[in-house]
Image (spheres, rainbow, N blue to C red):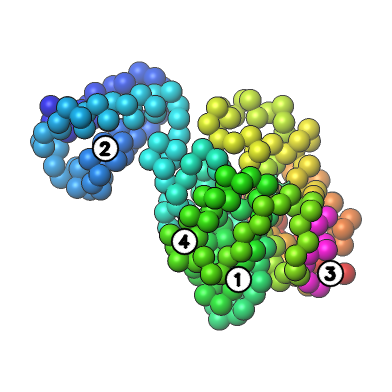
Amino acid sequence: MKIIDNLREGYKILKNNSIASYKIDSEILMSRTLEISREELILDLEKKVNFKEREKYLNLINRRKKNEPIAYIISNKSFWRDKFLIDKNVLIPRPDSEHLVEQTLKLIKKKKTKKILDIGVGSGCLTISILKERPYCKCDAIDVSKKALKLAKMNANLHQLADRIKFYKSDVDNFCNDKYDLIISNPPYIKKHKIKYLGVINFEPKIALDGGLDGLEVIRKVISKSKYLLKLNGKLILEIGSDQRYSVTNFLKEKNFFINNIIKDYGKNIRCIVSTKIN
Ligand SMILES: C[S@@+](CC[C@H](N)C(=O)[O-])C[C@H]1O[C@@H](n2cnc3c(N)ncnc32)[C@H](O)[C@@H]1O
């Protein structure tokens, strides 16, 4: 059977299972099967696919049919300017988190040396993207998940940053290592009872999403701890849920942070807050 015939079959299976991105997903999964780029695939649609390749492709289509995110199936995801290894132990990097990277880069001049802390490093996508753009900065990165840290270390190695990132398995509550110029964090911020409606929970780790009863449990911990871990005038760059603006800004003010900037995401929802520790 030719590539084109297998693709058509993939389109049909995914479409019948309400996968809106059925076309691009089938193509990505076929590229993955044949270990060629999507461009190469499109240029060679008449090529024959052997029995083993077809079996592998249909197996991937079958996983996607059950709504497994494509990033977990192909084990990587593009974020900012790079690709990151991804597995089921980490949150899939979201395009909206690129705002956090952008805001952080705005605060650090290209040749400046800054010490950064990433709370809840996950795959490492935030820290790695920032360090690649700011060659004189270093980062400490913490996570409660040992398995997430393992993957973040693999990504750090892959991007040749192992000597500029130190990883710690720690709850933010217990972490006390140094004083930082900047703290970045995309903590879990979904209300516990809402997680089941997200659909992703069958695949993404609960620990990366669950913000407790009001969604703010880890955010509050991050802010309280940042008060001690930041240098005076240090910056906290925090990703939040779109409905958390007022509770988070009030809490920041209570802890003597000055609010510098509130940033909307690509969907025009509030997504990121930049603040300064002022005393
Ligand atoms: C929303 S994910 C963010 C991952 C990654 N930084 C990103 O932006 O894609 C949150 C991460 O925080 C970690 N985490 C959850 N609770 C934590 C805590 N109390 N202390 C430290 N890390 C925590 C989770 O294991 C998860 O990797």
Q: Earlier in the sequence, mark 2 or mark 1?
A: 2
Label 3 and label 4: CA atoms lie apart by: 36 Å
Q: Which residue is under mark 2?
A: 33
* In the rendered image, the vertical position of residue 72 relative to residue 13, given as above or below: below
Secondary structure, mark 3, is: loop
Q: Residue at x 60, y 80 (%)?
A: 112
Q: Which residue is under mark 1?
A: 138
**Residue 199 placement: quadrant:** top right
Secondary structure, mark 2, is: helix
- Span of residues in magenta: 223-232
Q: Are marks 3 and 2 in contact (CB under 8 Å)?
A: no
**Residue 59 placement: quadrant:** top left
Looking at the rendered image, the quarter that the C terminus falls into is bottom right
Q: Nearer the viewer, mark 1 or mark 3?
A: 1
Type of residue at label 4? Answer: Asn
Q: Which mark is residue 157?
A: 4
Spot occupied by residue 210 in the image (x, y as percentages of width and height): 69, 36
Mark 4 residue crowding within 10 angstroms, few (<14) / some (14–19) / many (20+): few
Q: Earlier in the sequence, mark 1 or mark 3?
A: 1
Looking at the rendered image, the quarter that the N terminus falls into is top left
